[in-house]
Image (cartoon, rainbow, N blue to C red):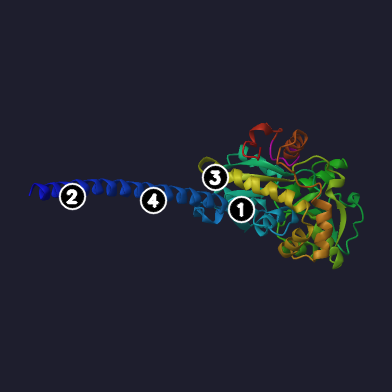
């Protein structure tokens, strides 16, 4: 009995040790499981960072073009095609407008987040528009030209004195280009008659063909295309008489700046990465440009050669001389009585460092 009892006691002792070992083993298993879960969570988070498509729908960005068919804004389409914005977690939605006026109305109404406009439109911030320029996109107006109907008697810029010149809106880049023709020739601020015809290609072509205007200041590529079709002639590129300017600027809506500043930073990073990308990818850039503008690829190849190497800013920094020229242009356009303090009309803190 004592032996049985000893054996029984011994059995009880063995059983208690087994329970403790089992419990320890279970704890170790749980620890390994938690570690695995942590590792997989970390991997998932890394994948989220590497795969922007997994980011939230809040990263959709509505971007307005004041002239949808212009080569100046084609880098946006190239960046989308090349996956540059997607890599940064941005779903870019392009919204086209017939001129800067309608685009900035949409920006003020918070219908778009970012706008691609002209330097003179920076004054809208001083007038209370809920936006500000956040990057200098392009300097001197290499992309603009003075274009006349094909059968026009106008042969030189001097022949345009007192003539009607079609512009996209006022204030706008094209209206400044038109006014500058008169001012550089000493005709005074009434030397030409600006006529608003919008920024759509179809409207500009119609105005030229119907002789509603004597000339337009518009996209150089459109002029070359119309010249091939014998519908218009390029009289002169606007860069012949304007050397410093902000041809295009990128504007951001106040709500975007206040609530999603990181999204704006990523977008600007993507834009300038695209500008760099285009330098070494002519074929893709021309292919995309041809689809956007509707122009033949060989014509877009010429425009690429003319613009891509030296037109677009590589970093978005505002050039002092360009800012001064824009301030002076606003006085010329009678948008203000005196040149504004341009330092209050732009920000550079969202640009890539």
Nearest to the observer: residue 63 or residue 44:
44
Residue 122 image point, x, y percent: 66, 41
**Which residue: 83% across, 48% down?**
238
SS state under label 1: helix
Q: Which mark is in front, 3 or 2?
A: 2
Disc 1 target residue: 87
> Real-space Cα distance between discs 4 and 1?
33 Å
> Real-space Cα distance between discs 1 and 3?
20 Å
Report whether 157 appears left or right of 300: right
Whichever of callouts 4 and 3 sits on the residue coming sooner in the sequence is 4
Nearest to the observer: residue 132 or residue 210:
132
> Real-space Cα distance between discs 2 and 1?
66 Å
- Binning the other alpha carbons within 10 Å of mark 4 as few (below 14), some (14 to 19) or many (20 upward) gives few
Whichever of callouts 2 and 1 sits on the residue coming sooner in the sequence is 2
Q: In which quarter of the image is residue 294?
A: bottom right
Disc 4 target residue: 33
Residue 281 image point, x, y percent: 77, 56
Report whether 18 appears left or right of 308: left
SS state under label 3: helix
Residue bounds of the magenta highlight: 331-336
**Which residue: 79% across, 47% down?**
311
Image quadrant for the C terminus?
A: top right
Q: Which mark is in front, 4 or 2?
A: 2
Q: Which mark is in front, 1 or 3?
A: 1
């Amino acid at each position: 009995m004592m032996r049985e009892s000893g054996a029984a006691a011994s059995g009880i002792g063995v059983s208690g040790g087994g329970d403790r070992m089992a419990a320890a083993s279970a704890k170790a298993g749980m620890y390994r499981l938690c570690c695995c879960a942590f590792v997989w969570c970390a991997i998932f988070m890394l994948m989220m960072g590497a795969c922007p498509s997994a980011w939230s729908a809040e990263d959709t960005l509505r971007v307005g073009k004041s002239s949808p068919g212009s080569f100046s804004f084609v880098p946006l389409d190239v960046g989308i095609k090349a996956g540059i914005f997607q890599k940064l977690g941005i779903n870019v939605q392009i919204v086209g407008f017939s001129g800067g006026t309608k685009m900035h109305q949409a920006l003020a109404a918070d219908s778009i987040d970012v706008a691609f406009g002209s330097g003179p439109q920076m004054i809208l911030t001083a007038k209370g528009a809920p936006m500000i320029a956040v990057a200098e996109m392009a300097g001197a107006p290499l992309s603009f030209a003075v274009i006349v109907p094909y059968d026009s008697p106008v042969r030189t810029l001097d022949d345009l004195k007192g003539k009607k010149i079609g512009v996209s809106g006022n204030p706008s880049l094209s209206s400044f280009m038109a006014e500058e023709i008169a001012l550089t020739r000493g005709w005074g601020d009434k030397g030409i008659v600006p006529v608003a015809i919008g920024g759509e290609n179809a409207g500009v072509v119609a105005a030229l063909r119907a002789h509603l205007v004597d000339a337009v200041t518009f996209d150089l590529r459109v002029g070359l295309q119309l010249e091939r079709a014998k519908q218009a002639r390029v009289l002169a590129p606007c860069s012949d008489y304007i050397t410093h300017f902000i041809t295009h600027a990128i504007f951001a809506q106040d709500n975007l700046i206040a609530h999603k500043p990181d999204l704006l930073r990523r977008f600007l990073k993507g834009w300038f990465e695209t500008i760099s990308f285009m330098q070494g990818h002519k074929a893709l850039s021309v292919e995309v440009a041809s689809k956007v503008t509707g122009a033949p690829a060989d014509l877009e190849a010429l425009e690429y050669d003319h613009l891509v190497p030296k037109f677009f800013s590589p970093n978005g920094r505002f050039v002092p001389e360009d800012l001064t020229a824009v301030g002076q242009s606003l006085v010329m356009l009678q948008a203000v009585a005196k040149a504004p303090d341009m330092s209050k009309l732009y920000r550079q803190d969202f640009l890539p460092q």
